[in-house]
Amino acid sequence: MGQFRKRTYKSLSGFLRDLRFLFANRRRIRHVMREKSIDPRMRERLMLAVTQVNECRFCSRFHSRLALTEGMSPDEIGALLQGETGACPSAELTALLYAQHWADVEGDTGLDARNRLVAVYGQSVADDIELVLRVIKAGNYTGNTVDCLLHRVSGGRWGG
């Protein structure tokens, strides 16, 4: 059995911390996700960018379908799932590169990167972008943790 390499929750406390954050911010999350404070296509691009870094197969499939319903092309979705942002709207490029970096460093982007995000989009939208990133990270890590458990109990046959 090979080692499981995807990002997962390493402890129950990490999972509970994210769960508490999501619960405490549920109204704001609902606003951002349902009331479209961020363009739905941009939101799905952000979700796919983080999912690509974290390699969650469940979120990849789910958000690919949502992106299609929002009018994104299969080619653009495929490119994002390969980590490529060239086909994305230029106005979203800063956010997408930030999302990839944010996922890669597990949210520890540093002040300079955060300040660039705020400079381009303003404080409110930058806050909403980070909220989207935290939501998808929790989904990715949860899906990957389930996959890790499947991988372990099956001797590596499941949970790829």
Image (spheres, helix red, strand yellow):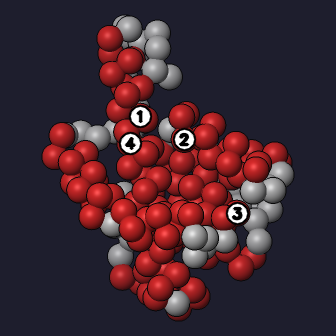
State the residue in front, 100 or 29: 29
Counting residues from the start of the chain, the first of labels 4 and 2 encountered is 2
Rendered residue at 71%/79% (across/down): 91
Q: Which residue is mark 3?
A: 41
What residue lies at 76% left-to-right and 50% top-to-bottom? 69
> Along the line of sight, which residue is nearer the eye, 126 or 102?
126
Quarter holding residue 151: top left
**Mark 3 burial class by Cα count in 10 Å: few <14, some 14-19, many 20+:** some
Which amino acid type is marked by label 1?
Answer: Asn
Q: Nearer the viewer, mark 4 or mark 3?
A: 3
Q: What is the number of the mark on residue 59? A: 2
Q: Amino acid at mark 3?
A: Arg
Q: Are marks 1 and 4 in contact (CB under 8 Å)?
A: yes
Point out which mark residue 144 bears.
1
Question: How far apart in space, not on screen, are marks 4 and 3 (Cα)?
Answer: 23 Å
Q: Position of residue 149 (x, y in %)?
A: 33, 22
Distance from the alpha carbon under mark 3 to that under mark 1: 24 Å
Question: Which image quarter holds the N terminus?
Answer: top left
Residue 105 spot, x, y in % from top left = 39, 59
Disc nearer the start of the sequence (3/2): 3
Q: Which mark is residue 141?
A: 4
Asked if the residues shown at circle 2 and circle 1 are in contact, with their CB atoms under 8 angstroms apart, the answer is no
Q: Does residue 38 show up?
A: yes
Q: Residue furthest left?
A: 13
Tags 4 and 2 touching, CB below 8 Å: no
Find residue 22 and name its label.
none
